[in-house]
Image (tube, rainbow, N blue to C red):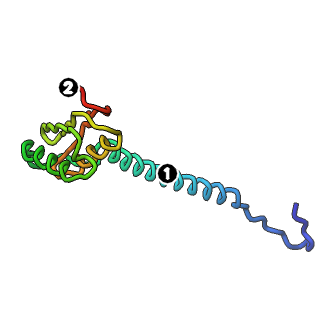
Amino acid sequence: MTRNILPHRKVARRPYFGNLVLRNMRKATSERLISIGGILLALALQSGCALLFGGKSKPTASVDDGALVARIHAMLAQDPIVKQAEVNVASAKGVVELTGYVGSMSIKSRAGLVAASTPGVVQVHNDLLVSAAPAH
């Protein structure tokens, strides 16, 4: 309690708003953090979905599957790692399927990479089998 030194003067007590101000500041800060967290979550989900469900966009024009298969065969024949492998290529609307036999996992992976990097390819199904010798 405030003590009045001079009896003829009254000490006016001012209301204390410190707790109210602090409470409002904390509330505003937490609201800002929640909104920033929501924005970051939305951005993370958007970029994650783009990575998981479509690194490549679907082609706007129709894909000529015959020309696409020819381009992939040419690129596979030029690649020093894959050129000796038996790789069959089929395509339907830009979705490429690789079948056949290869000697190692590195050749299988490289063939899939070469096919995926070909312009016009929407998706690659790498169904190559790894074996020492092709089964005839």
Front residue of 22 and 66: 66
**Mark 1 or mark 2: which comes first in sequence?**
1
x and y percentages locating residue 13 in the rendered image: 78, 64
Judging by the rendered image, the residue that carries numbered circle 2 is 136
Residue at mark 1 to residue at mark 2: CA–CA distance? 59 Å
**Image quarter of residue 126:** top left
x and y percentages locating residue 42 in the rendered image: 41, 48
Q: Secondary structure at mark 1?
A: helix
Front residue of 129 and 66: 129
Judging by the rendered image, the residue that carries numbered circle 1 is 37
Q: Residue at 14% x, 37% y: name it.
A: 90
Left of 40 or right of it: where is 112?
left
Front residue of 86 and 31: 86
Left of 101 or right of it: where is 15?
right
**Image quarter of residue 18:** bottom right
What amino acid is labelled 2 in the image? His
Q: Where does the N terminus fall, quadrant-wise?
A: bottom right
